[in-house]
Image (cartoon, grey):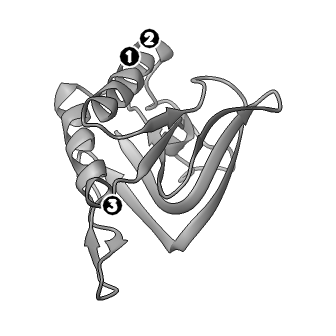
Amino acid sequence: MRGVVQRVCSASVSVDNKVVGRINHGILLLLGVEDTDNEKDLEYMCEKVPNLRIFEDENGKMNKSLLDVEGSLLVISQFTLFGDARKGRRPSFISAAAPEKAIPMYENFINKMNGKGIVTESGEFGAHMQVELVNDGPVTILLESKKIF
């Protein structure tokens, strides 16, 4: 699984001009599922995202997690995180998981975040979405469950 974590003051996602998810202070997570991902990859992301210390403490150091600051999470499915643009001009998405695999993993991630007591909103899997955010910092972190970067 791959994730783009953005610390935000606020974020929202709309489908057909209707807001389907909105948060204030917290994390906007673009989440992609790879065809080779398994339960281990899901568990890695479920542990890493809410515990990533990207929020400032009283000394201005990034020392607090989403859980520490009681922030919210907006999760957006993003198969294009597995776009391979190394050859040619058109990205290949061959390593992105098919919906039959990606949807349950995406939904599992959301359920597990809710289970941790995190207010979690989401986009609509497979829909054309418009995402708005106010990046705080800006702070943007890339995550990869297989730790290739």
Query: Of the residues tagged 1 and 2, which is closer to the observer?
Result: 1
Residue at the spot 40% in from the left edge and 63% down from the top edge? 141
Query: Of the residues tagged 1 and 3, which is closer to the observer?
Result: 3
Q: Which of the numbered marks, if any, corresponds to residue 104?
A: 1
Q: Quadrant of residue 114?
A: top left
| Relative depth, front residue between 98 and 127 | 127
Tally the numbered discs. 3
- Left or right: where 134 falls relative to 71: right
Distance between mark 1 and mark 2 Cα atoms = 7 Å
Q: Secondary structure at mark 1?
A: helix
Judging by the rendered image, the residue that carries numbered circle 3 is 69
Residue at the spot 49% in from the left edge and 30% down from the top edge? 94
At label 2, which amino acid type do we have? Answer: Glu
Query: Of the residues tagged 2 and 3, which is closer to the observer?
Result: 3
Q: Quadrant of residue 111?
A: top left
| Residue 65 place in picture, x, y as percent | 28, 61
Distance between mark 1 and mark 3 Cα atoms = 28 Å
Classify mark 3: residues with Cα within 10 Å, few (<14), some (14-19) or many (20+).
Answer: few
Q: Is residue 86 above or below residue 118?
A: below
| Residue 147 place in picture, x, y as percent | 23, 53
Residue at the spot 48% in from the left edge and 60% down from the top edge? 6
Classify mark 2: residues with Cα within 10 Å, few (<14), some (14-19) or many (20+).
Answer: few
**The C terminus sits in image quarter:** bottom left
Q: Secondary structure at mark 3?
A: helix
| Relative depth, front residue between 141 and 16 | 16
Q: Is residue 81 above or below residue 57?
A: above
At label 1, which amino acid type do we have? Answer: Pro
Judging by the rendered image, the residue that carries numbered circle 2 is 100
| Residue 40 place in picture, x, y as percent | 16, 32
Classify mark 1: residues with Cα within 10 Å, few (<14), some (14-19) or many (20+).
Answer: few
For marks 2 and 3 on the same chain, the one whose residue lies earlier in the sequence? 3
